[in-house]
Amino acid sequence: MSAYVVGRRHIDFLVAAFLASDGLAPIREVGGADHLGGILWHGNVTSVNHRYCEDEPTPPYTYTPLTLPDLTTAEGLAYAYKAVRGYRYQSCEHPGWPGCDVDRWTAALELGFKTALTAAGGNERSHRGGWDVPPDYDPALIVVTERLAR
């Protein structure tokens, strides 16, 4: 397997998703959105460092709010589901991953999005894009792009 450090917007997306979810990550207990994002990014950097025998530091992190895609649509739910899956795939390379807090939190978030996506009649192909959240992420473009592709 390969791994890469996800971008800052990807971490912002995950933090926003946790803020929108009812208690899937103990945001208050970990010290707020900035600290949660730092923990998430550190988990990802730890994975990449282990995979490639590196010792790169985790960049400092400050949460920048963003708008999630419309989570009442299959397209929006599929985008969110894939973003969490992508993060998990890039972050699972180190031996401390199984059962750690970040593994448990993101697994719960992934399951929540998958369950909602299934209930909405969709699947992960409801969003044709990949699983990375780009630096120029714009939730308004998700549904428009998906509908144009049909």
Image (spheres, rainbow, N blue to C red):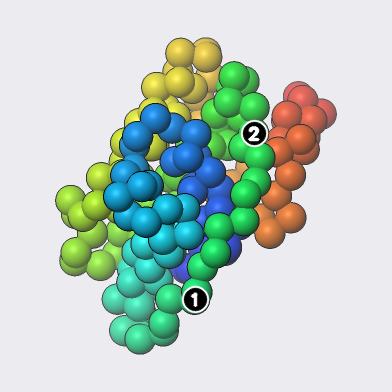
Q: Seen in the image, is 108 located left or right of residue 141? A: left
Q: Which numbered dot is residue 41?
A: none
* Placement of the C terminus among the 4 image quadrants: top right
Residue occupying image coordinates x 52% and y 13%: 121
Residue 2's quadrant in the figure?
A: bottom left
Percent position of residue 37, x then y: 45, 58
Residue sitting nearer the eye, 121 or 109: 109
Percent position of residue 134, x then y: 66, 55
* Placement of the N terminus among the 4 image quadrants: bottom left
Q: How far apart in space, not on screen, are marks 1 and 2 (Cα)?
A: 26 Å
Secondary structure of the residue carrying numbered label 1: loop
Secondary structure of the residue carrying numbered label 2: loop
Question: Of label 1 and label 2, which has the lower sequence position?
Answer: 1
Q: Residues within 10 Å of mark 2 (few under 14, many from 20)?
A: many
Q: Seen in the image, is 11 located left or right of residue 28? A: right
- Please name the amino acid that badge 1 sits on: Pro
Q: Seen in the image, is 67 located left or right of residue 4? A: right
Q: Seen in the image, is 127 located left or right of residue 49? A: right
Percent position of residue 86, x then y: 46, 50
Q: Name the residue under label 1.
A: 59
Q: Mark 2 points at which residue?
A: 69
Tell me if residue 112 can be seen: yes
Residue occupying image coordinates x 48% and y 40%: 19
- Please name the amino acid that badge 2 sits on: Pro
Residue occupying image coordinates x 48% and y 59%: 34
Percent position of residue 33, x then y: 47, 53
Q: How crowded is mark 1: few (under 14 residues within 10 Å), some or many (20 or more)?
A: few
Q: In this view, does 87 lie above or below 51?
A: above
